[in-house]
Structures are given as structure tokens and as C-alpha cells.
Image (cartoon, rainbow, N blue to C red):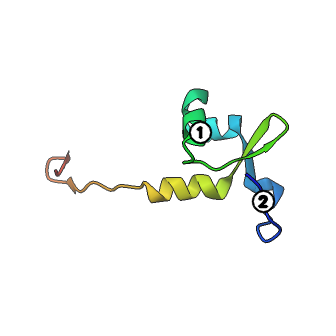
Amino acid sequence: MTMNNNNNFPLEDWLDSQDVMMKLHISLRTLHKLRDSGTLPYSRINNKIYFRRQDLEAILNNNYTRKPIDFTDGKIIK
């Protein structure tokens, strides 16, 4: 993945694999699947892989689902 000059992001907006796994509570294998499927874009420098914080937030926001809850008995309404 390349980054053109129109998309400059500060260094603090980039996370390494370990940071992403800790933030999302996922394994290295799951992270590889997200990366290899194209779900999670990345940048590679030598053998180190970095992810943009904004891409993580976008994936979480795009997959957000809210199930209605019946507060009378605390069960999820189907």
C-alpha cells in the first residue's frame, strides 16, 4: 500500500500490529486475516506493518449494530 502526498497522517495516527491486537482484543492470526482480506488497510516498512487509527475506527463504526432491548425483562428483541 502506498501513501500519496495528499494523505499525510501524523505519526501518532499509526499503530503497529501489537497495538492493534491489544486495542481490538484479537489474535495475530485474526489480524492477519483482516489484513490479507483487505478489510484492514496497512503500510509496510521493511518487515514492520502499521495501521491507521482512522481505519480501525471506520471498521468499528461501519460494523456497529445495535440490537433493541426489552427493558422489562432485559432480553434482546429479535
Residue corresponding to mark 2? 3
Q: Residues within 10 Å of mark 1 (few under 14, many from 20)?
A: few
**Residue 34, x across and y down, in percent:** 55, 40
Left or right of 77 on screen, residue 31 = right
Q: Is residue 49 above or below residue 71?
A: above
Q: Residues within 10 Å of mark 2 (few under 14, many from 20)?
A: few
**The image quarter in which residue 45 lies:** top right
Q: Who's the residue at 41% across and 55% down the image?
A: 64
Q: Nearer the viewer, residue 7 or 2?
A: 2
In space, the residues marked 1 and 2 are separated at their CA atoms by 18 Å
Q: Secondary structure at mark 1?
A: helix
Q: Secondary structure at mark 2?
A: loop
Q: Amino acid at mark 2?
A: Met
Q: Who's the residue at 32% across and 56% down the image?
A: 66
Q: Who's the residue at 57% across and 28% down the image?
A: 29
**Residue 57, x across and y down, in percent:** 57, 56
- Which of the numbered marks, if any, corresponds to residue 36? 1
Left or right of 65 on screen, residue 45 = right
Q: Nearer the viewer, residue 55 or 76?
A: 55
Left or right of 55 on screen, residue 11 = right
Query: Residue lying farthest bottom?
Result: 6
Q: Amino acid at mark 1?
A: Asp
In terms of sequence position, does the residue under pointer 1 or pointer 2 come before the other? Answer: 2
- Which of the numbered marks, if any, corresponds to residue 76? none
**Residue 67, x across and y down, in percent:** 27, 54
The reply to whether dot 1 and dot 2 touch (C-beta < 8 Å) is no
Left or right of 59 on screen, residue 10 = right
